Image (tube, helix red, strand yellow):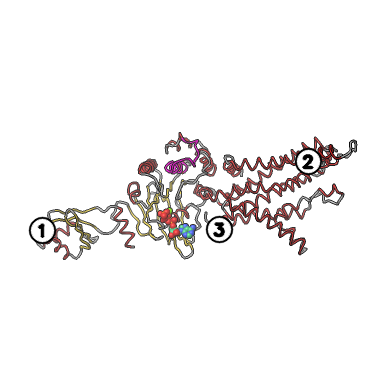
Amino acid sequence: MKQLLKTEALTKRYGKLTAVNALSIEIEEGQVFGMLGPNGSGKTTTLGMLLGVTEKTSGNFSWFGGESGPETRKKIGAILERPIFFPGYTAVENLKIVAKIKGIDLKNMDHVLGLVNLYDRRNDQFGAYSLGMKQRLAIAAAMLCDPKALILDEPTNGLDPEGIAQIRQIILDIAGMGKSIILASHLLDEVQKVCSSCIILRKGELVFQGAVSADMGGMKRVEIDAPNREQLQEALKEIPFVNAIEKDASGFLVTLDAQQDSFTLNKYLQDRGMVVSHLKTVKKTLEEQFLEIVKQS
Amino acid sequence: MIRLIQLEWLKAKPARFFWILLMLYMALLISVPISVQGLSDWIIRNFLPENLGLDNVNLFYDFQDIWQNFTFVFQYFSVFLGTLIIIHVAREFSLKTARQNIIDGLSKSEFVWSKVLFIAFIAALITLFVALLALLFGALFSPSVGTSLMFENVHFLGAYYLHLVQDMLFAMFIAMLVRRPGIAVVVYLFYAWLESFAHLVIKHALGWDLVAKLLPNTATKGMIHTPMYKYVLQPVQTYVAWEDLAISVGYIGLFIVLSMWMMKKRDL
Ligand SMILES: Nc1ncnc2c1ncn2[C@@H]1O[C@H](COP(=O)(O)OP(=O)(O)OP(=O)(O)O)[C@@H](O)[C@H]1O
Ligand SMILES: [Mg+2]
């Protein structure tokens, strides 16, 4: 697999505040990569450095296995934070400016306007667009140069469920064309639905990097029940690798150490003469894992 | 280079303020010779005895002198072009389009150069317009006509061009410094007032002629000396001094360097 992006100890300080601290990551081409983190964790700052609008304090980065600078940015389509265009100009007038900067002709314009469903509104002023249309126009602008990589920072920010679904479908369509996408968001749901792997940032620190479906938290949770619940609860309390016990509708929800699983739990109970009526490993939602990761570190 | 000028054109063309200020400026330029003509007719008709043969206000259009007369008066309208440039540049920061331009692949120095080239281009168009205006009014009203005379003092157009470029680059610099269109316009106008005040103090109260001459707004108007005194028979400098040109060119370089430096240093 070819490398899309590599950063080495990339750092940005605003006075005393370290917005991004020694970030080192590698991203491969051809995937939808998530960049997750709560508000203020440094996502936009990181992307700003990668896109030449925020001066880095120290560290390095390179695109496509060793490039950076304006010529590289011409091969990338990117939106940071919110769609930016001249409000009084039409979509077409705005896209002409983008095309001129990127040094490309306009043959792709109708196609990208169609892609985001704005072809019929192309001669309306940007300022008169709804928020969802503005976001879509930004995606069209990013796609205008047939980019090698697409960078989207909170593309669904402020949209209603329908708008979110539309943007998500567009992202999936674009990913289907084999483009690399970096998607920054504080919405886990969003990352979970479209990304294959991700990083999680917290206060400018990298706290997780890996596949989205993998066990991110390093802990397992198991649903368990038995005819005699008091007895079960007593027994669970005795078990050293059980970290937490919560009561729920179908019995108990217990959190195990990472090395243990439902099999070892069942065996442990059986050895002590306890028979269970229900036993199920719960896959944690990314939301729970995310909160756990962010809380822990 | 062509690409950068085309880029600025795409940015300016759909903007209403751009056309309004440009048209206003051109209308003001045209109004000067027209009102001078009207005024001279009116004076001659009402106040001078007939057959005096003294068509003296037509001297305003006299070839040779017309270049200095026109460009000297026109300099006083440049504030409209400065305002145009301030809005054109500063709004790119308040709307954040400058940031998006960089993201899209423009380099920061290209961003500045495209503005500089655009200014040079607009200044050239306006200088051409002034040349046509002077030729037209000269051909119509000049007491003395003849190709050798006609272009004698045409070099005032060069000084006028430098004046326009320096003035607009100063406006660009203020816009990049302040970044908010409204405030930048206020700063620009306030500075002009402040400098004219400072100029009085420095030149007349302190008597530091050289320092007064080096102030930017004074320098930009200092290349073309006031021609009107000749009508009351005072000596007038009817050429452009090299040192005055050099000062203007120096400021042009300085504003470009400072703008470039600010652009590179600051986040967008
Ligand atoms: N221009 C700036 N000056 C000072 N501090 C800044 C500046 N820009 C960002 N910061 C700080 O850097 C930190 C990271 O901000 P950043 O915008 O990168 O967060 P984010 O992850 O994109 O958050 P969000 O999800 O809210 O968009 C924050 O603490 C923020 O206050
Ligand atoms: Mg952000």
Q: Mark 3 and mark 1, same subunit? A: no
Q: Residue A234 falls in which quadrant of the image?
A: bottom left
- Residue B52's mark? none
Q: Residue furthest right?
A: B52
Asked if residue B119 lies left or right of residue B96, the reply is right
Q: Residue furthest front?
A: B46
Q: Are marks 2 and 3 in contact (CB under 8 Å)?
A: no
Front tag of 3 and 1: 1
Q: Earlier in the sequence, mark 2 or mark 3?
A: 2
- Residue B36's mark? 2
* Residue that label 3 marks: B265
* Residue that label 1 marks: A228
Q: CA distance from mark 2 to mark 1?
A: 108 Å
Q: Which residue is at 76% across, 38% downward?
A: B34
Q: Amino acid at mark 2?
A: Val
- Which is more toward the observer, A167 or A133? A133
- The disc numbered 1 marks a residue on which chain? A
Q: Are marks 2 and 1 in contact (CB under 8 Å)?
A: no
Q: Position of residue B214 (x, y in %)?
A: 73, 58
Q: Which residue is at 51% across, 57% downward?
A: A55
* The stretch drawn in magenta includes residue A216: no
- The disc numbered 2 marks a residue on which chain? B
- Which is more toward the observer, B119 or A247? A247
Q: Amino acid at mark 1?
A: Asn
Crowdedness of circle 2 by 10 Å Cα count: few (<14), some, many (20+)? some
- Which is more toward the observer, B73 or A187? B73
Q: Is residue B166 above or below residue A240?
A: above
Residue stretch rendered in magenta on the structure: A121-141
